Image (tube, helix red, strand yellow):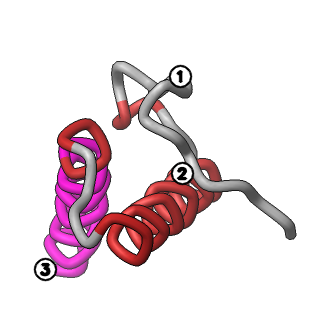
Amino acid sequence: MPFSALKPSDEFPKDLSSLSEPDLEVLQRRVNEELFRECNERLIADTETMFRFNAVAHEVAVREAFRDLSGL
């Protein structure tokens, strides 16, 4: 499935916990692509892109932790 990088000026969901798993994965790929592009072009990422990268990584980690705990 083709996707485009999520530029800092693009819309970003306010509540990541409301996203479905596939939507969160797409968002993660788009944010990662933008981070990769910025670092390759300017050698530093935009502050907004870093915030988004960390917010998505946090949401993914929370979901993985809940999945792990559900097996107990």
Q: CA distance from mark 3 to mark 1?
A: 37 Å
> Alpha-carbon neighbours of circle 3 within 10 Å: few (<14), some, or many (≥20)?
few
Residue holding disc 1: 11
Which numbered tag is attached to residue 1?
none
Q: Quadrant of residue 44?
A: bottom left
Secondary structure found at label 1: loop
Secondary structure found at label 2: helix
Q: Mark 2 and 3 residues: CB-CB less than 8 Å, in contact? A: no
Give the residue type at disc 2.
Answer: Leu
2 or 3: tag closer to the N-terminus = 2
Q: Quadrant of residue 69?
A: bottom left
Name above or below for residue 8 compared with residue 69. above
**In the figure, is residue 2 to the left or right of 33?**
right
Residue holding disc 2: 27
Q: Which residues are magenta?
A: 51-72
Residue 21's spot in the image, x, y percent? 54, 56
Which numbered tag is attached to residue 72?
3
